[in-house]
Image: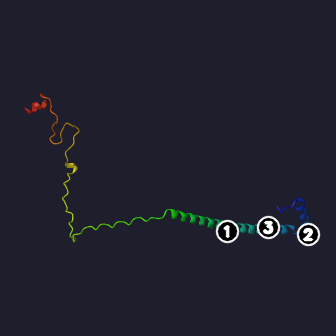
Amino acid sequence: MFGIDTSEFLLVAFVALVVIGPKDLPKAMRVLGYWVGRARAVGRQFRAGFDEMVREAELEEMEKKWKAENERIMREHPFVPPPPALPEPESPTADDDTQLPVMVEKPEVVPAEAAAPTTADPHVSADAGERDVEAPRGTFQDKAAS
């Protein structure tokens, strides 16, 4: 990690054991671990702050590019407002000198019940119930008519 070989690490561990002593060595290792953890947390926080600054700088650069591109597009395709709407024509009133439309009676509508009855036989007329086609002579109708 720091360029320390195994032999150098064992030498440092032996010196620490001799200087600190076997009784206080676990406590010293806990304190060392605590401070190493704190140093890592500070390093992570520094890196996160640095990454955020880089991201903000990139966003500012992108916003400048977008603004320039938007201005270019707006120059090439200017906004043309729609033509103004025509005013509504005034409806004539009774006070005006103009002629108002004349009301006409509605045509009479015959209800469906009063309409001519329909039959299933196409040869029977709806008005009289008689046959539309002539019957051949010598049939029942001739005898009934005579």
Using the rendered view, name the quadrant where residue 68 is placed.
Answer: bottom right
Q: Is residue 120 above or below residue 17?
A: above
Mark sitting earlier along the chain (2/3): 2
Measured from the top left, where is residue 63 in percent x and y? 59, 66
Q: Give the left or right position of residue 108, taking residue 57 as reference.
A: left
Residue of label 3: 36
Q: Earlier in the sequence, mark 3 or mark 1?
A: 3
The amino acid pointed to by label 2 is: Val
Q: Residues within 10 Å of mark 3 (few under 14, many from 20)?
A: few
Name the residue rendered at 79%, 67% in the picture. 36
- The residue under label 1 is 53
Q: Nearer the viewer, residue 91 or 136?
A: 91
Give me the disc on residue 19.
2
Q: In the picture, which quadrant includes the C terminus? A: top left
Could you give the CA–CA distance between mark 2 and mark 3, rounded to whole angstroms?
A: 21 Å
- Quick check: 29 above or below 105? below
Mark 1 belongs to which amino acid? Met
Q: Is residue 131 left or right of residue 25?
A: left
Q: How many marks?
A: 3
Residue 78 pos. (x, y %): 48, 64
x and y percent of residue 41 in the render? 74, 68
N-terminal of the two: label 2 or label 1?
2
The residue depicted at 91 percent of the width and 66 percent of the height is 15
Q: Nearer the viewer, residue 44 or 74?
A: 74
Which quarter of the figure has residue 105? bottom left
Q: Amino acid at mark 3?
A: Val
Q: Secondary structure at mark 1?
A: helix
